Image (cartoon, rainbow, N blue to C red):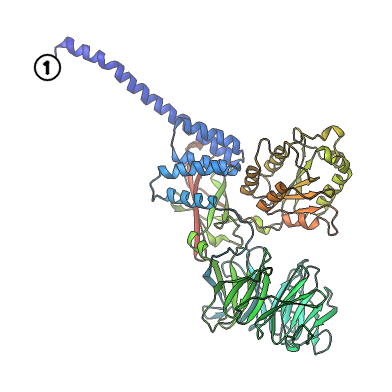
């Protein structure tokens, strides 16, 4: 039916408001998309310059224009996480995961991140209760027809993830990295080692190596260079016959299992003979086959393979009794873990023993029943390394749940200021957020839009550098007024404990309004004036200021808090204790405390130290605080920096360029995906 001309015109006028409304809605939608993109870009740029609060505001504004956009939710979660608000981060990631397709790569990445952040954090490489360890790899003694090492008898893990392997069969000690690559060989003086068996290190970094057939102990410096011998062949005092396992106690004394003489000998750090533990007494039946030895808090634990027992002695060699562990088959190597529990080799089993309760559980097994494991220890990544003497290899055992969950990988920052040159900062952890150390270029694969980047450059990881930044936080409470001179002493001791490359980057006064002090002259800045001290001082604001100043500096960093042992009523007025702990931990900042006076440390400070890997020490303890300060530069953090030349078009700085990293280690892997904006041209 054909409409009359007048009716058509009326219909057209009737439709015009609707058409204009649709055009207006479309224009509004386009403007919202542009505003969201603009805010998103500003948020990403702020995040990459460590301005996390600013990034949160930009991402929140972007979401107001584009509600439910999963990429913005992902980035908002990242910014909340780095700001110490784990709960808020999880909510954003959970919302984004619900929007992505369930089996999409984005949803799977978010699912792994959510699971890891939901788990409790554990900074130390300790054995988890009730979780078995399974073989995840091995360092073979032969490869491609070439002998790398022969008959390994003991291992000594290092902080960087590598391990010294004592090779009894090839008369050497070899250092192997996490990928099984040999980096160094020690063969001793001109006459060489003579059947080396065990290796330990003292608090100063010096090594002791037992030589079973040489009937002596070789002393090596920190670089592994031979220095001297301790002991000689014989049965007299200070003589040795077939020395095997070694231990160094808390005071630096060396304990040697003198197997051929069926005794244990003690030497001072200079090699002077002190005493023997041997022979029968009314309470001790004597050794039948002494093997492993370990020291803890003034007690000496000695395993006897034939007696199937672990004996306990004091530091003077007096017998204290047995560690009543049931079910031992033939214990050999003993090593104490960082949590105070004993790692023991028992035939082909690896045991974890609580020395207080004598309770034992089997962590894992290596080979069949006929296999002989002579030594075991836990490496810097929480794996157990066990020497299979007969098999000629070192077995690697990993927690079963770690094998299933893989690695937790986070791209922490992308620097594109010199685009097309791009630098990516990557943190690699396990499922309990413990750092994975010792990785190298072969463990990383970077890609943009699914294509591997060309010629990636692997920079020296911060783990292998001695650079560390320290921010000193001064308590300005009324209780600190009597300790103004002690404050100066504490800061001087901190300066004196700095290792090469480390520095103090800021001095923060935690008063009513925390401020950064001028360090010139340092003494006056530290002492402050009477008006600086107030009962309303703000710990939370001061700590946040001290920590934020460390973000753009060295990757090894710490806040050292000088405290009277009082927190004050306003300690957590703006930031809660858990938020502060998460802010420090999520940004790799250690929290250490130096106590002045005689008050015990409050639980809040203990919690912060535990969560970040720090410690609490009194200023005037006999050993001083130098060790605590130096440890800041030696603690691993699992951060790696990789550079490459981007091939993507930048659209004059407006394009969001994706970057992805995959990390592989033995049978485990992990990945993360993010993006960046190049600078405006």
Residue 309 position within the rendered picture, expressed as x and y whole percent measured from the top left: 67, 80
Residue 641 position within the rendered picture, expressed as x and y whole percent measured from the top left: 59, 53
Give 644 or 36, whichever is nearer the viewer. 36
User: Secondary structure under badge 1?
Assistant: loop
Q: Residue furthest front?
A: 282
Q: Residue at x 52, y 39 (%)?
A: 76
Mark 1 Cα shell of 10 Å, populated few (<14), some (14-19), many (≥20): few
- The answer to whether residue 489 is left or right of residue 39 is right
Q: Residue furthest top?
A: 6
Q: Residue furthest left?
A: 1
Residue 290 position within the rendered picture, expressed as x and y whole percent measured from the top left: 70, 83
Please, is residue 260 above or below residue 38 in the view? below
Please, is residue 188 above or below residue 668 in the view? below
Q: Residue at x 59, y 74 (%)?
A: 350
Give 107 or 565, whichever is nearer the viewer. 565
- The answer to whether residue 18 is left or right of residue 585 is left
Q: Is residue 259 visible?
A: yes
Locate residue 310: give its quadrant: bottom right
Looking at the rendered image, the quarter that the C terminus falls into is: top right
- The answer to whether residue 549 is left or right of residue 19 is right
Residue 518 position within the rendered picture, expressed as x and y whole percent measured from the top left: 80, 37
Give 145 or 61, whichever is nearer the viewer. 61
Please, is residue 23 above or below residue 38 in the view? above
- Residue at image mark 1: 2
Locate residue 528: give its quadrant: top right
Q: Total of numbered circles in the picture?
A: 1
Q: Residue at x 80, y 56 (%)?
A: 626
Give 187 or 167, whichever is nearer the viewer. 167
Q: Is residue 661 visible?
A: no
């Amino acid at each position: 039916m054909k409409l009359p001309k007048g009716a058509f015109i009326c219909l057209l006028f009737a439709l015009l408001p609707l058409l204009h409304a649709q055009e207006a809605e479309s224009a509004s939608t386009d403007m919202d998309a542009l505003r969201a993109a603009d805010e998103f870009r500003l948020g990403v740029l702020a995040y990459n310059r460590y301005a996390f609060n600013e990034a949160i505001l930009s991402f929140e504004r972007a979401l107001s224009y584009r509600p439910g956009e999963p990429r913005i939710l992902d980035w908002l979660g990242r910014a909340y996480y780095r700001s110490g608000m784990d709960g808020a981060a999880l909510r954003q990631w959970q919302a984004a995961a619900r929007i992505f397709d369930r089996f999409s790569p984005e949803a799977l990445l978010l699912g792994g991140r959510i699971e890891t952040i939901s788990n409790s954090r554990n900074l130390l490489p300790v054995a988890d209760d009730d979780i078995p360890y399974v073989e995840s790899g091995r360092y073979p003694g032969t490869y491609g027809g070439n002998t790398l090492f022969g008959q390994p008898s003991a291992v000594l893990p290092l902080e960087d993830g590598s391990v010294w392997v004592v090779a009894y069969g090839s008369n050497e000690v070899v250092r192997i990295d996490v990928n099984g690559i040999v980096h160094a060989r020690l063969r001793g003086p001109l006459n060489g080692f003579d059947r080396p068996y065990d290796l330990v290190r003292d608090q100063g970094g010096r090594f002791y190596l037992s030589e079973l057939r040489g009937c002596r102990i070789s002393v090596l410096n920190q670089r592994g260079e031979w220095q001297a011998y301790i002991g000689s062949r014989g049965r007299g005092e200070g003589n040795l016959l077939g020395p095997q396992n070694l231990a160094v106690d808390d005071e630096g004394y060396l304990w040697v299992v003198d197997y051929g003489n069926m005794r244990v000998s003690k030497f001072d750090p200079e090699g002077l003979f002190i005493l023997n533990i041997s022979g029968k007494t009314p309470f001790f039946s004597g050794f039948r086959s002494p093997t492993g030895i370990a020291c803890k808090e003034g007690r000496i634990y000695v395993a006897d393979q034939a007696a199937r027992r672990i004996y306990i002695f004091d530091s003077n060699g007096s017998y204290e009794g047995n560690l009543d562990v049931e079910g031992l088959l033939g214990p050999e190597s003993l090593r104490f873990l960082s949590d105070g529990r004993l790692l023991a080799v028992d035939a082909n089993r690896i045991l974890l023993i609580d020395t207080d309760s004598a309770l034992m559980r089997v962590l894992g097994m290596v080979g069949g029943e006929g296999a002989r494991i002579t030594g075991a220890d836990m490496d810097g990544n929480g794996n157990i390394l066990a020497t299979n003497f007969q098999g000629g290899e070192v077995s690697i055992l990993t927690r079963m749940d770690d094998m299933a969950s893989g690695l937790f990988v986070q791209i922490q920052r992308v620097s594109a200021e010199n685009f097309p040159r791009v630098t990516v900062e990557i943190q690699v952890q396990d499922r309990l957020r413990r750092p994975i150390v010792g990785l190298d270029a072969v463990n990383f694969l970077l890609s943009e839009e699914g294509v591997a980047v060309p010629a990636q450059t692997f920079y020296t990881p911060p783990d292998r550098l001695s650079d560390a930044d320290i921010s000193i936080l001064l308590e300005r409470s009324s209780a600190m007024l009597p300790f103004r001179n002690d404050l100066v002493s504490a800061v001087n001791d901190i300066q004196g404990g700095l290792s090469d490359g480390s520095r103090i980057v800021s001095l923060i006064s935690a008063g009513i309004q925390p401020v950064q002090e001028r360090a010139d002259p340092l003494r006056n800045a530290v002492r402050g004036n009477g008006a600086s001290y107030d009962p309303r001082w703000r710990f939370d604001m001061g700590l946040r200021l001290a920590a934020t100043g460390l973000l753009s500096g060295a990757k090894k960093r710490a806040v050292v808090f000088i405290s009277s042992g009082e927190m004050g009523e306003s300690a957590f007025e703006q930031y809660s204790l858990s938020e502060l702990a998460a802010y420090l931990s999520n940004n790799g900042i250690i929290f250490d405390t130096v106590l002045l006076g005689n008050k015990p440390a409050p639980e809040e400070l203990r919690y912060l130290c535990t969560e970040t890997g720090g410690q609490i020490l009194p200023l005037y303890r006999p050993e001083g605080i130098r060790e605590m300060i130096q440890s800041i530069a030696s603690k691993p953090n699992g951060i790696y920096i990789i550079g490459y030349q981007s091939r993507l078009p930048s659209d004059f700085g407006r394009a969001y360029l994706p970057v992805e990293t995959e990390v592989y280690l033995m049978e485990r892997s992990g990945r993360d995906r993010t993006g960046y904006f190049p600078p405006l041209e």
